Structures are given as structure tokens and as C-alpha cells.
Amino acid sequence: MAAAWLWTASEWRRRWPMLLTLAALIMLAGGVATALAAGARRADSAFDRFETATAAPNLFAELDLDQADGSALDRADEVAAIDGVEGVVVESWWAISLFPELDPPGVVVAFAIGPAASFGRIDESLVVRGRLPGTDQSDAVVINEEAARLLDVDIGDSMSFRTASPQRIGEWAENDGQFDSAAALDGPVVEVVVVAVAVADDDLGEDRFPNITFSEGFARAHRDDIAHLEPAIFARADPRRIDEVAGAMQSALAPVTARVAPGAGPG
């Protein structure tokens, strides 16, 4: 049963061409949700209260990676300064092999997520046990309960992952976040510790996936030695001012923004 669930998660991560759209559905501390499930749950007042309590994002800026060239980190503070914005997070995708034993023959999946930078209050996951990492913790990961159960790990447990170097970024990006050989995992082997088990919006639905999220401190420590991208900026805006803030975000992020989508995020 555990292998079946992890296989499903691994296959989902392989669908790189769809991930720019699905970036709106992936967030810090276990934020992975399907659009249909999110839409259905929004009708539930309990889910609305969950989103409010966790400051879930309600705006999503998809970046034009051909134009952005790392500028997401430089421009995130401009988004944070927009009147009506309560919080901002820049998302990173990393070439990290999470479940190598479950990869199909001849394929090495290397895909993980985490925040690259954050401002204000946004996506404050509900912690079941442990404590969310500080921005200076470079070796910390947060997992959801499904990962704790299926991987048999918990607070204080160490985990080790192989990575791909920045020299592999073209190959990685052009091949759906995967390689055809483990030899491509030529980056550092990273050692991390589970510091929190948290509940995210996808944990409220029927389809639950094991999730491991790397910390902002990890991004700072490894942005020069692991292949990665910053494809999206998420924001939590005053719900009464969504359209106004979306327009301001579009202006602040031009010309590196492919689109700003009100309501496209997990909130």
C-alpha cells in the first residue's frame, strides 16, 4: 500500500509540462491540492476557516522563466509592498531525488519544492507536532502525516537525498524534471532533519500524498550548488481587494510575469 501511494506521488511529480499551471496548487509545508478538490472544499465553511487560519495564498504569479532569470527573488519585496498584500512567498523547484526506489526503470525523478523567500504572514501550516523551521535553518524539512506514516519517519529523524548540480539544469528542465541515469545526480548529498509534521489543505481531502518540503534556509544554503528554478510567486491578499492587488502585482512583475491569477492558488 505504501509503495502504491508513493508511486502515485512520484508519477505526479513527473508531469513537468503541467507544473507551471499546477504551481498554483503547490505550496510550503505540504501544500499540494487538485483543482477539483480545492473547488469542492471551498464550498465548505470549515475549509474556508482553515484557509483563513493558515493565511493560504489567494493570488499566484506564474513567471516567464525565459525572462525572469532569477528576478523573482529581487521582485518579491515589491509585491510585498503592495497595499492590500498580507504575505508573499517565492516558490523554488529543486532537482532532488526523493524516492529513488520507486522510480520506474530507466528514469530518475528529481523534483522537490520549498520557499526561496517569504515576507509577511502566508501559508502558516497547522503543526501537528514539532516546530516550523526558522529562516536560518538550512537542514530542516517539514513533512505531512502521510509522509510520516508511509516513510516511517518523524520529528528528529534524519533523511538523506541525492541532488543534481546547476550544470544539469537544462537537461533537468527539458526532460520533465527527470533524468535517464542516476549519474546525473552529481550535486551534493544533502542531510536534513524532520522538524515538523504539519497539516495542509490537501490533507483534508480523500487523495493524500506524502509530502516533504524544504526550508527557506535550505534554499539560501544550496542555491549555488543544486539545480533549481523559481517559477512562481504566491501572495495572500485582503480577500476584498483581490482584483486590485492582482493588477498591481502584474505591473510590479512586468515583464517577467506570464500571468497573475486571482484565486488560482490553494487559497
Image (cartoon, rainbow, N blue to C red):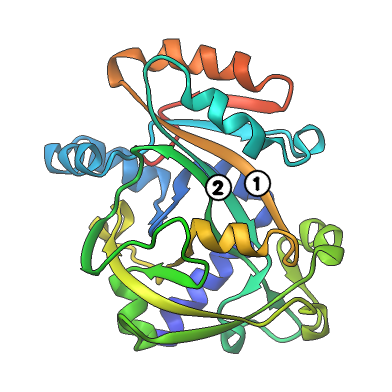
Q: Quadrant of residue 132?
A: bottom left
Give the left or right position of residue 175, taking residue 147 as reference. right
Q: Mark 2–mark 1 contact, CB under 8 Å?
A: yes
Name the residue at 19% across, 37% down: 48
Q: Secondary structure at mark 1?
A: strand
Q: Quadrant of residue 164?
A: bottom right
Q: Residues within 10 Å of mark 2 (few under 14, many from 20)?
A: many
Give the left or right position of residue 120, taking residue 47 as reference. right
Q: Secondary structure at mark 2?
A: strand
> Taking 60 as reference, is 167 above or below it?
below
What residue did someone put label 1 on? Answer: 230
Residue 251 x, y percent position in the rendering: 62, 13
Q: Amino acid at mark 2?
A: Glu
User: Which one is nearer the viewer's eye here, 144 or 4?
Assistant: 144
The numbered disc on residue 91 is 2
Estimate the spatial distance between the alpha carbons at disc 2 and disc 1, rounded to whole Å: 6 Å
> Taking 2 as reference, is 134 above or below it?
above
Q: Quadrant of residue 181?
A: bottom right
Residue 183 x, y percent position in the rendering: 82, 84
Q: Quadrant of the N terminus?
A: bottom left
Name the residue at 69% across, 59% down: 223
User: Which one is nearer the viewer's eye here, 31 or 39?
Assistant: 31
> Taking 10 as reference, is 13 above or below it?
above
Q: Amino acid at mark 1?
A: Glu
